[in-house]
Image: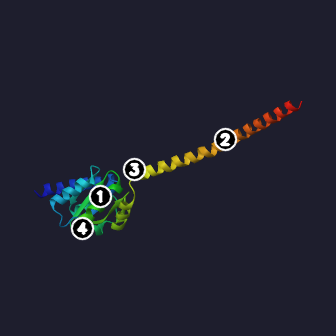
Amino acid sequence: MAEKIRVDKGAAVAELTDNFRNSPATLLTEYRGLTVAQLTELRRSLGKTTSYAVTKNTLARRAASDAGIDGLDALFTGPTALAFVSGDPVEAAKSLRDFARANPLLVIKGGVFEGKAITAAEVTKIADLESREVLLAKLAGAMKANLGKAAAVFQAPLSKAARTVAALQDKRATTDSGADSSA
């Protein structure tokens, strides 16, 4: 029986280690006092690209260490749940922040972003960023505006040259017609 438990723990650590390694971000929370219904609502709010799992601190600590992540040991106290993000970390951080505002029993402890440990304040800063889609739309808008300006700059000398040629033709036509009437 004890051997089966050890094997189960080993499999759990291996799975957690893979999650730490394969997720661009992992967010650590304390969920003490939340109901099962609230945890279900939280999981739903995180979307399909983030998995939220309650885990034992000793297993999570060992998995983080096996994944080469330092600086999380102090966060593995009390009831801990891990949000493994496979999509946009900003969206997951926003979802956790918003849920924590509505449910103060959820405490964001910190996390891992691109392999580095981050504090709860840094998670909040990530949550305050605009989403990837919004940033890409702003970039596209700025590029489009700059392209329009560039086209106007390139077009300006051509239109100026066309106006100059037209003015010269008008001047020549008036000069030629004035010379014809005096002869």
Image quadrant assignment for residue 81: bottom left
Q: Secondary structure at mark 2?
A: helix
Q: Quadrant of the N terminus?
A: bottom left
Tell me the colour scheme of the image.
rainbow
For marks 4 and 3, give the CA distance.
29 Å
Q: Is residue 1 visible?
A: yes
Q: Which residue is mark 4?
A: 104
Q: Which residue is mark 3?
A: 133
Type of amino acid at the residue the image marks with label 2: Ser
Q: Position of residue 83 (x, y in %)?
A: 27, 57
Labels 3 & 2 near each other (Cβ < 8 A): no
For marks 1 and 4, give the CA distance.
14 Å
Q: Earlier along the polypeptide chain: callout 4 or callout 3?
A: 4
Q: Residues within 10 Å of mark 3 (few under 14, many from 20)?
A: few
Type of amino acid at the residue the image marks with label 4: Pro
Type of amino acid at the residue the image marks with label 1: Ser
Considering depth in this image, is 149 or 44 the residue closer to the camera? 149
Q: Which residue is mark 2?
A: 159
